[in-house]
Image: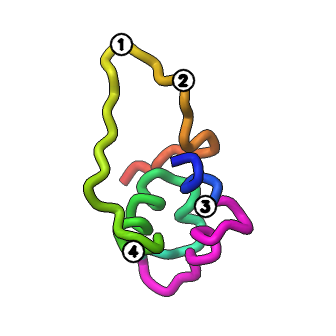
């Protein structure tokens, strides 16, 4: 997850692939969770993003922020 975050920053391969080639790869989508999610769903990564499970322990902070610069989602 941290590597994905790095690659969405300027100079990263995922950031470069946000080239407007589809509605899900528009520049600026790297700034929100939803934008990144749609880009990943659209196949922006080199490998499939299947079978991943993420767990949250109730009442426990993992102490890891995998998207520290995220912007709030726009209300629609």
- Magenta-drawn stretch contains 16: yes
* Left or right relative to 33: residue 19: right
Q: Nearer the viewer, residue 38 or 53?
A: 53
Q: Secondary structure at mark 1?
A: loop
**Separation of disc 4 and disc 2 at Cα?**
29 Å
Q: Nearer the viewer, residue 51 or 29?
A: 51
Q: Secondary structure at mark 3?
A: loop
Any mark on residue 16, and which?
none
Q: Answer few, some or many: residues within 10 Å of disc 4's Cα (few below 14, many 20 plus, some between 14 and 19).
A: few
User: Which residue in the structure is indicated by mark 1?
Assistant: 59
In terms of sequence position, does the residue under pointer 1 or pointer 4 come before the other?
4
User: Which residue in the structure is indicated by mark 3?
Assistant: 8
Q: Quadrant of the C terminus?
A: bottom left
- 29 is higher (above) or lower (below) than 70: below
The answer to which image quadrant residue 53 occupies is: top left
**Residue 30 location (% of width, % of height):** 56, 60
User: Which residue in the structure is indicated by mark 4?
Assistant: 43
**Separation of disc 1 and disc 3 at Cα?**
30 Å
In terms of sequence position, does the residue under pointer 4 or pointer 3 come before the other?
3
User: Which residue in the structure is indicated by mark 2?
Assistant: 63
Q: Answer few, some or many: residues within 10 Å of disc 2's Cα (few below 14, many 20 plus, some between 14 and 19).
A: few
**Separation of disc 4 and disc 3 at Cα?**
14 Å
**Circles 1 and 4 in contact, beta carbons < 8 Å:** no
Q: Residue at x 57, y 77 (%)?
A: 17
**Circles 4 and 2 in contact, beta carbons < 8 Å:** no
Q: Residue at x 59, y 72 (%)?
A: 27
Q: Which residues are magenta?
A: 9-23
In terms of sequence position, does the residue under pointer 4 or pointer 2 come before the other?
4
Q: Answer few, some or many: residues within 10 Å of disc 1's Cα (few below 14, many 20 plus, some between 14 and 19).
A: few
């Amino acid at each position: 997850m941290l590597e994905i975050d790095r690659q969405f920053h300027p100079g990263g391969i995922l950031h470069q692939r946000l080239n407007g080639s589809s509605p899900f790869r528009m520049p600026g989508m790297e700034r929100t969770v939803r934008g990144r999610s749609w880009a990943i769903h659209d196949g922006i990564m080199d490998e499939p993003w299947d079978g991943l499970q993420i767990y949250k322990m109730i009442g426990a902070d993992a102490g890891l922020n995998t998207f520290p610069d995220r912007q709030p989602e726009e209300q629609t």
